[in-house]
Image: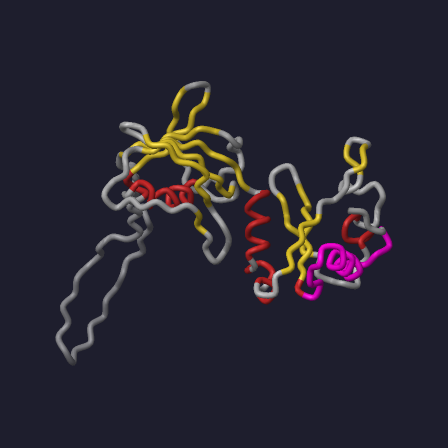
Amino acid sequence: MRGEEGWTVGELKQYIGESFNLNSSSMRLLVLDGTLSAYNVIHLENGESSLKEVLFKGDVFSSHKLHREQLVVPTIYVLSDPIDFLEKYKDSLMYKYVDFHFNSILLDITLPPPQPEAALTTTNVPKGGMIMKIISINYEEDKRKIQVQVDKRITLAQLKRELVPLIGVPPTGFIVYGIRNNEEYEMERLDETLMDIVSGSKLIVRLGRVSIKLYLLQFCKFMMESVVAVGTLNEITLQEWSVP
């Protein structure tokens, strides 16, 4: 649809409402502000703001408007829902679904046979937002192949927690492998996000214990023992010591 650059956000809402028979008073407008790695979802909340300012940053050469010398028309996402509108912006389903859609990747994951505690879940929408959604699942003799849509901003540790219901063992009971140059490699860094994984990549999950190294740091040694009778006063001299 075409709009006027001089309109305000409120006037755009009114025009959309009249054009599509929607209630503009319970309408939210979202627009994407993208980078190479992730997208920010911007809420066009202030009805008095001009479209030129919020969409084009007030500059005709804004990245919203020109890309490789071609005109780029901003895409605006619209929802008019009186119930979802009552939620705080980042608690609304509209924000969660749009944010997840543009900041997620597809992964093809091979899983072992389900253990007794496994349970199939298709979409996880926790309070903070969506993390993983199952697109498809295929059963084979000794394995399962699933395709999932997952938020690429989560860590490997979070991904493993999401896979627990599908496998039936705790995160320490299985290992995730990636494939590089047709060879498997163990993904070990649990605190690393999925930002560097290309959408459509293949992962393999194998049952097995994850090895954990524990280091004991001993900061002091036993120095002395003194038995003092009740009601007596003893003077104790301590020698200086340092951590070896």
**Which quadrant does the C terminus fall into?**
top left
The magenta stretch spans residue 203 = no
- Would you place residue 18 above or below residue 57 in this image? below
Can you give x and y, in whole percent of width and height, for residue 96 in the image?
55, 53
Q: Which residues are magenta?
A: 5-25
Q: Is residue 85 left or right of residue 21?
A: left
Q: Residue furthest top?
A: 182
- Residue 147 position by quadrant: top left
Foreground: 194 or 120?
Answer: 120
Vertical placement of 162 versus 137: above or below?
A: below
Q: Position of residue 108 (x, y in %)?
A: 44, 31
Does residue 220 appear to the left or right of 2 in the view shown?
left
Number of marks in the rendered image: 0
Residue at the extreme front of the image, as rendered: 21
- Most common SS among magenta residues: helix
Whether residue 88 sits left or right of residue 24 in the image: it is left
What residue is drawn where x is 84% and y is 46%?
59
**Tell me, what colour scheme is on the image?**
secondary structure
> Looking at the image, which residue is at 57% across and 65% down?
83
Residue 151 point in image, percent of width and height: 51, 43
Q: Residue 84: percent from the left, percent from the top?
A: 57, 62
Residue found at x 64% / y 48%: 40
| Of 194 and 82, the residue lying toward us | 82
Point 39% across, 26% down: residue: 185
Residue 21 belongs to the span the image colors magenta:
yes
Image quadrant in which you'd find residue 60: top right
